[in-house]
Image (cartoon, grey):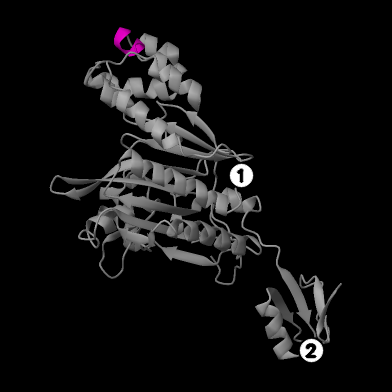
Amino acid sequence: MPQGDADWAVVLDCQAVFGKEAPMIATRPINSGLLPEGLSDRLPPQAEASARLVRDVLDTVSTYGYARVMPPLAEFEETLTARLQSASAEDLLRVIDPVSQRSLALRPDITAQIGRIASTRMVHAVRPLRLCYAGSVLKLRADQLRPEREEMQVGAELIGNDSEVAATEIVTVAIEALQAAGVTGITIDFTLPDLVDQLAAGPMPLSPEMIEPVRERLDAKDAGGLVALGPQAAAYLPFIEAAGPFHAAMERLEAIDAGGALTSRIAALRAIARPIGWDITLTLDPTERHGFEYHSWFGFSIFAEGFVGEVGRGGSYVIDHGDGQEEPAMGFSLYPDPLIDAGFGRENSRRIFLPLGHDAQQAKALRGHGWKTVAALAEGDDGQALGCSHWLNGDEPQPY
């Protein structure tokens, strides 16, 4: 291949990897503006909107006593995968650390890192421990509903307690955080992630090999599939009907004869729902499992009017401290990128153009009153073209 051929810019010698007989591999130059699939730039005004929305959420969470932590983007693979219950090693983007020569993994979720911090660096901190966070996460693969592989994750974790009181606080904080960011039309969908496990070991027995098939068919609302599994599985059919608007679904859940095994869960759900405002829509799907595989007794999904899919999720779970030691926890995560794309977080800021020779003290005073100033650097600079709605005429802002 000629060295001057512009179509072939990079030549890789693979002999070191594949042996002396391996062929030379050439790759075409990459367009300098091209990004990997599922990754994108945040440009103005979305980048600023993202920062503002994240700040609004964290400011709200902090008023409830949650302190911010900032875990790193990458960790040793074995450390991360040991705690990452929502993904496996095959779902991680990995690299070799040139310093330690060990495999690193880029985080697909921050909750696992909060668990690591709580069980190591802050293991002796007084409980309940309230922590919050915000940062980017990176997935190996995207799905059709959300093709983005990188997304912002913002959330809060309450560590050391998973009672109904803790659940009430977490749900309340999540709702108020979204409302502070300007989100309306919020729906909270409650679920009981370990429902099948609890009943299978007691009043509605299932053999161990039947538990997962029953979970899957309940999650898919597959009544025919449940019946096909046999009479023990068919006993779970009423739970498919116990879904929908909260109060009606709760009545159907209460009507299921489960030997009193559901009494405490039903009471807890009602207690969690009681303080939620009338402007929030509540629903119940007691057998929903997707995204709640590692949660314990309680889970909830958050939806917003006009958006496809969830904008957040939360619930109770267990942090493994090792040596058989476990700690209950409760938390939520928000994924605000769809909100940002829809215009949430944007500020109707006033931008004023400062001509050459303007009064610097007057410009400083304008910034103190909330104006954003854009100063001319040359005679030909155009304030309107630079996004300004006003220009400084002497001492007074004048609209264009």
Mark count: 2
User: Could you tell me what secondary structure mostly forms the magenta stretch?
Assistant: helix
Q: Secondary structure at mark 1?
A: loop
> Against 62, is 148 above or below?
above
Which residue does the image show at 40% across and 42% down from the upper left?
A: 168
Asked if residue 383 can be seen in this view, the reply is no
Which numbered tag is attached to residue 215?
Answer: none
Task: Indicate the amino acid at tag 2.
Answer: Leu
- Residue underneath mark 1: 184
Asked if residue 68 can be seen in this view, the reply is yes
Which residue does the image show at 25% across and 54% down from the upper left?
A: 127
- Image quadrant for the C terminus? bottom right
Task: Indicate the amino acid at tag 1.
Answer: Thr
- Residue underneath mark 2: 356
* Pair 2/1: label in front: 1
Asked if the stretch drawn in magenta spans residue 66, the answer is no
Task: Specify the segment rendered in magenta.
Answer: 231-235
Left or right side of 325 for 180: right
Q: Where is residue 285 drawn, in percent x and y?
A: 45, 27
Q: Quadrant of residue 290?
A: top left
Which residue does the image show at 65% across and 50% down from the upper left?
A: 342
- Mark 2 crowdedness (10 Å alpha carbons): few <14, some 14-19, many ≥20: few
Pick whichever, 368 or 297, lies toward us: 368
Q: Where is residue 273 drawn, in percent x and y?
A: 45, 35
Q: Residue at the left extreme?
A: 323
Point out the tag, 2 or 1, that comes first from the N-terminus: 1
Q: Give the spatial CA distance, label 2 vs label 1.
A: 44 Å
Q: Secondary structure at mark 2?
A: loop
Pick whichever, 397 or 28, lies toward us: 397
Mark 2 vs 1: CB contact within 8 A: no
> Against 127, is 274 above or below?
above
> Against 260, is 44 above or below?
below
